[in-house]
Image (cartoon, rainbow, N blue to C red):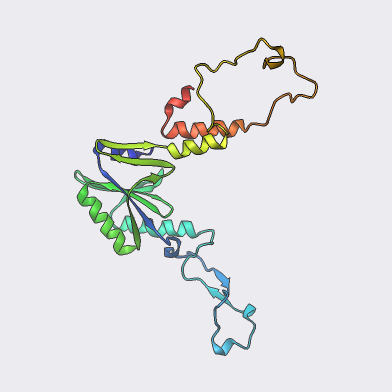
Amino acid sequence: MSKTKLSDIRQDLLLKDFRKDPAYLYGSLDNDIYMKLPEGFHLPEAYNSDSREHYSIKLDKSLYGLKQSGRMWYNRLSDYFLEEGYKYDPICPCIFMRRSGNEFVIIAVYVDDLNIIGTPEKLLKAINCLKKEFEMKDLGRTKYCFGLQVEHLKNGILVHQETYIAKVLKRFYMDKSHPLSTPMVVRSLDVKKDPFRPRENDEEFLGPEVPYLSAIGALIYLANHTRPDNICC
């Protein structure tokens, strides 16, 4: 669980979700990039006699599809935050914080999603400043972020991964399974039904292929976020 979520829970602060769409169009390029004339682009009459293949367009801003667009958007956003007095830790450069006495606001950035928490006055000021600089979409209270589901309760916040768990169970064909009182294999007095019977000549030695490492990885991901109790399973 991130430090941002823990701060929100401890102080019972409001966690809001904002999205910048389209975000990548705000980035400024740091080098010259040219592209072919897009379909539907009309050349000036003075150039119509030449082939369209002889011309190209120089980009003034980043576009979706450029390999550096994400980086350019982050630079644009982080420069704005730093100008407004926010600070960030180089180890975690996507979390920006501004504090004044007991008042503070924290902004966690993930691509074009911004999760904002803080004391009421600082929170409102941060939201208004962002809306003046960018076209932001207010998605209300954060309900889903970084693979975590967030439920706002009367006495706090519940962070869980119910949707992720359901997907994992379905992926590994465990959604139809039933819990047992013991994980021990039940043996049978009937030799043909005994799971430890001698293997037949045409019987598979290892059984069906199971993505064991993928299943373990999915459980570790879950344990690192919301279910540390899975480590002891």
Q: Residue at x 45, y 61 (%)?
A: 24
Q: Is residue 63 above or below residue 114?
A: below
Residue pushed farthest front?
A: 190
Q: Nearer the viewer, residue 131 or 85?
A: 131
Q: Residue at x 36, y 58 (%)?
A: 79
Count of numbered badges drawn on the protein:
0
Q: Look at the image and tell me in which quarter the N terminus lies.
A: top left
Residue 90: image x %, image y %? 40, 46
- Horizontal side, residue 138 vs residue 99: left or right: right
Q: Is residue 34 above or below residue 22?
A: below
Q: Is residue 169 above or below residue 84?
A: above
Residue pushed farthest top?
A: 189
Residue 87: image x %, image y %? 32, 49
- Horizontal side, residue 14 vs residue 227: left or right: left
Q: Residue at x 41, y 33 (%)?
A: 226
Residue 136: image x %, image y %? 34, 60
Q: Nearer the viewer, residue 204 or 137?
A: 204
